[in-house]
């Protein structure tokens, strides 16, 4: 059974940093497509960052480019999201997602609200105060 478990969320002041983690069990993340999404209540899900694991190549949404970094730890079957220079508008529930196909992984197609990811975590809340 595939499980994605996020952690690392919390409350922080604007300008601060948080590091989210997504531990995967049930399959090996190497050579797959992993992403972070976020959702604000009442709004569409927004893709934040995606990584093609193995190569470690990444792609980011415009709203977080230069501030967030997605990375992998293949030994721990884990993907991280380092979030720096946080803003109040980053406040959301953050979700980890995975799919076993790398097709179109590193493109805007992987960050759309309807992007096709087979596996999702339960989410971790990030709150940024001004």
Image (cartoon, helix red, strand yellow):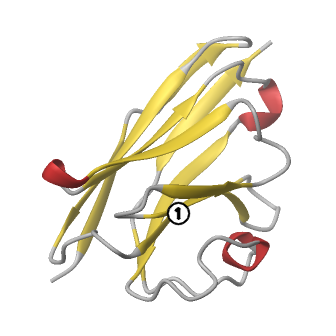
Q: Residue at x 28, y 69 (%)?
A: 29
Q: Which element is circle 1 on? A: strand
Q: Is residue 41 above or below residue 28?
A: above
**Is residue 37 something that shows in the picture?**
no
In percent of the image, x 41 and y 62: which residue is there?
A: 55
Q: Residues within 10 Å of mark 1 (few under 14, many from 20)?
A: many
The image shows residue 59 at horizontal and vertical percentages of 67, 58
- For label 1, the residue is 35
Residue 113 percent across, percent down from the top left? 74, 75
Out of 102 and 45, give the one closest to the viewer: 102
Q: Is residue 18 visible?
A: yes
Q: Position of residue 3 (x, y in %)?
A: 24, 70
**Count of marks placed on residues:** 1
User: In the rendered image, which quarter is residue 119 located in?
Assistant: bottom left
In this view, the residue farthest toward the front is 55
Q: Nearer the viewer, residue 41 or 13?
A: 13
**Residue 4 rendering spot, x and y as whole percentages:** 30, 64
Report which quarter residue 37 is drawn in: bottom right
For the point 66% across and 75% down, which residue is it? 110
The quadrant of the picture occupied by the C terminus is top right
Question: In the visual, does 72 lie left or right of 118?
Answer: left
């Amino acid at each position: 059974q595939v499980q994605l478990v996020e952690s690392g969320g919390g409350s922080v002041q604007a300008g601060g940093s948080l590091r989210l983690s997504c531990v995967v069990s049930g399959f090996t993340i190497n050579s797959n497509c992993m992403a972070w999404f976020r959702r604000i209540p009442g709004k569409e899900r927004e893709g934040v960052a995606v990584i093609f694991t193995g190569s470690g190549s990444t792609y980011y949404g415009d709203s977080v480019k230069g501030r967030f970094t997605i990375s992998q730890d293949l030994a721990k079957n884990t993907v991280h999201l380092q979030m720096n220079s946080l803003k109040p508008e980053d406040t959301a529930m953050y979700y980890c997602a995975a799919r076993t196909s790398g097709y179109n992984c590193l493109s805007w197609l992987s960050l759309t609200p309807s992007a096709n990811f087979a596996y999702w975590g339960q989410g971790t809340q990030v709150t940024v105060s001004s």
